Image: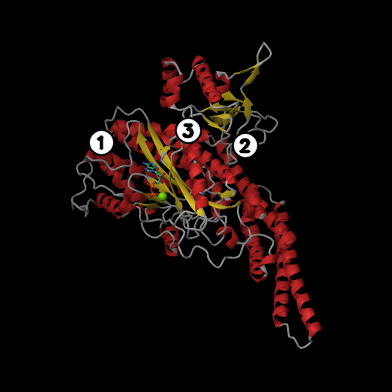
Amino acid sequence: MGTLPEYFESMVFDDRVMKATLSAGVYRSLKKTIDEGAQLDESVANAVAAAMKDWAVSKGATHYTHWFQPLTGVTAEKHDSFISPSPDGGVIMEFSGKELIKGEPDASSFPSGGLRATFEARGYTAWDPTSYAFIKGKTLCIPTAFCSYGGEALDKKTPLLRSMEALNRQALRILRLFGNTGVKCVRTSVGPEQEYFLITREMYDKRRDLRFTGRTLFGARPPKGQEMDDHYFGVIKPRVEAYMQELNEELWKLGILAKTEHNEVAPAQHELAPIYTTTNIATDHNQLTMEIMQKVAARHGLVCLLHEKPFAGVNGSGKHNNWSIATDTGVNLLSPGETPYENAQFLLFLCAVIQAVDDYQDLLRLSVATAGNDHRLGANEAPPAVVSIFLGDELNAVLEAIEEDLPYQGAEKTQMKLGVDVLPRFNRDTTDRNRTSPFAFTGNKFEFRMVGSSNSIACANIMLNSAVAESLRLYADRLEQAKDFAGELHEMIREVIRKHKRIIFNGNGYDESWIKEAVEKRGLCNYRTTPDCMPHLLDEKNVRMLTAHGVYSEAELRSRCDIMLENYCKTVRIEAGTMVDMARTEILPAVESYAASLAKAAAAKKALAASIACNYETTLVSRLSALADQIYERAAELEDALTALESAGDILEESAAIRDTVLEKMRALRLACDQAETVTAKDYWPFPTYGDLLFGVN
Ligand code: ADP
Ligand code: MG
């Protein structure tokens, strides 16, 4: 395959390939579109399409697809071949600018939340030239946005691009106020760290819960779990090593900079971190990464579980969304600078994030809300459902000094006067201690830790970008009017700190007393479940902000709220149905036949000699019988609760009923089944246990 530099990005129509295959004029036009969002004209599109096709064909591609991210959470593609009949009877490979720019997939089966009546089946996909096309298998994949004919977004990329544009607009206003005229564009970057589990294919196939829902719905705690902490950063097993090696190679070919990999806290859990890149590309890359993780696993006889909580009792998986704001001139606006002037600018952007997270904590919470992630947040393995910011002692002291006009008691013990003093350097070492915070400053970026492992990172970043754009808009409105810029800036920053410091919390986020304080003293939101938070998407302040920045239309917001709740309901209904089914057709027969075999053994012994007591068999048979009765009853109760959902008036009511009744009945059924597992002979148990699954890959 050659060396890494040779095959890195070899399957991507990247800048190098564009430069080499396009004429200078076409290349320049395309660059202008990519860098500055300029319109692309048809002749340029045709030239790009032709070059793309020739390149793809030379790499063995026969098909192309508009690759997009519908609201289902996975990516979608519909393959068309390049082949056209040629006049002389053979075939030629064709691909026009029109086909590159626009596609019309039959989209009637993608969720639209009522935006596109199903009889009006066609939406269209539109090329996103800011994300490079790539080859997967034999198909040229063209990253696209997906819209209805009315122009409403039916995907996650469109609002993400809009939110990046909103932040760019407002950040440029701020930079101009600081006298910065050189910057053309401000973008956010993201490095998402991805956690996952690997189990063997053989065991996966034997568990219907894993196959139907991606997580185990039953399973007693194994004698050994994660209590020894011996897996975390431990030696990687050869089979996993081989998997990671191939995964890296596949990702590198697509230009995805997978960089670090290590074992995570739970047994069988691992993590992959890429090098950060522009947010929309990072989002595309993360979708691809999840897909390729699963594909490569299949080649190794493994299954990659991306669910947030595949196993009860051991840590679940998340995705740490490392996020920063940078200029096209390479300046990270969340990095404290070398000069007082740069520091004032840094503090303004820092305040913008603090205010954004405080004002829109509900949006951040709901951007990560799914049935799967509800199991994780607040379970002492992931941040609580209460959003707060960790700044670290040093930065916190700086903000306090500014707020109180007091000397900063840092290394230099200087008076903090904005625009005059140099801020201390905030080393990552002094800030990255707190792993319990939902939103932590880590030296020159923020790490949003609430994102679920299977979530697209698009939603979180849409809300983050938009909320920060809104803070910046407020600041720009105010500062543009100011007569004394420095004085006004200083005053404004003090005000923001005073008003929004309630969102800053540097202690232990897992502490029960924190949740109490957050809710009761600080008035922060604590939305524990998806049905609790999702309806707030339509709160007036949120609709106003998101529509004002052009990120969503009101109709789009309504449809998204519906789709997310629908998703929640469907997920739990499938889980509950699977549980009833497994309990009745697998677990009960197993318990029953084990009890029968015990009874038979006891009877045989008694026949041998009536004096044999058979205490063991008798006790166990009655215990198993009692559990079987419980399982039988609880399965029926769960089934009734599911049936009752049918009378729910709307999706809001249905999701609330699931939260309040179905989940509880699922827990009850599981409890009885898990107890039965601990007293049933292993040979009788119908599927692999937690111990088998978690320690099965060698
Ligand atoms: P940690 O140990 O805090 O998890 P790492 O150095 O391993 O930090 O980086 C974690 C992730 O953060 C990586 O994906 C990395 O590329 C990303 N990252 C680093 N710097 C930035 C930045 N300025 N903006 C966004 N992401 C970043
Ligand atoms: Mg991290």
Residue at the disc numbered 3: 162
Characterize the local packing of mark 2: few (<14), some (14-19) or many (20 or more) Cα atoms within 10 angstroms.
many
Query: Any mark on residue 211, and which?
Result: none
Q: Is residue 93 above or below residue 572?
A: above
Going by the image, does 591 lie left or right of 333? right
Task: Tell me the distance, in whole angstroms, between the alpha carbons under discs 2 and 3.
Answer: 19 Å
Q: Report the front residue among 435 and 226.
A: 226
Q: Report the front residue among 470 and 421.
A: 421
Q: Is residue 351 above or below residue 600?
A: above
* Sequence-first disc among 1 and 2: 2
The residue sitting at 37% across, 59% down in the picture is 507
Q: Residue furthest right?
A: 607
- Whether residue 454 is visible to the viewer of this picture, yes or no, is yes
Characterize the local packing of mark 3: few (<14), some (14-19) or many (20 or more) Cα atoms within 10 angstroms.
some
Characterize the local packing of mark 1: few (<14), some (14-19) or many (20 or more) Cα atoms within 10 angstroms.
some
State how many labels appear. 3
* Sequence-first disc among 3 and 1: 3
Task: Tell me the distance, in whole angstroms, between the alpha carbons under discs 3 and 1.
Answer: 30 Å
What amino acid is labelled 3 in the image? Arg
Q: Residue furthest top?
A: 88
Q: Report the front residue among 581 and 377.
A: 581
Residue at the disc numbered 2: 112
What amino acid is labelled 1 in the image? Phe
Estimate the x, y position of residue 203 in percent, counting from the top left: 63, 55
Query: Any mark on residue 485, and which?
Result: 1
- Whether residue 540 is visible to the viewer of this picture, yes or no, is no
The residue sitting at 26% across, 50% down in the picture is 398
Q: Quadrant of ligand 1?
A: top left
Q: Quadrant of the C terminus?
A: bottom right
What amino acid is labelled 2 in the image? Ser
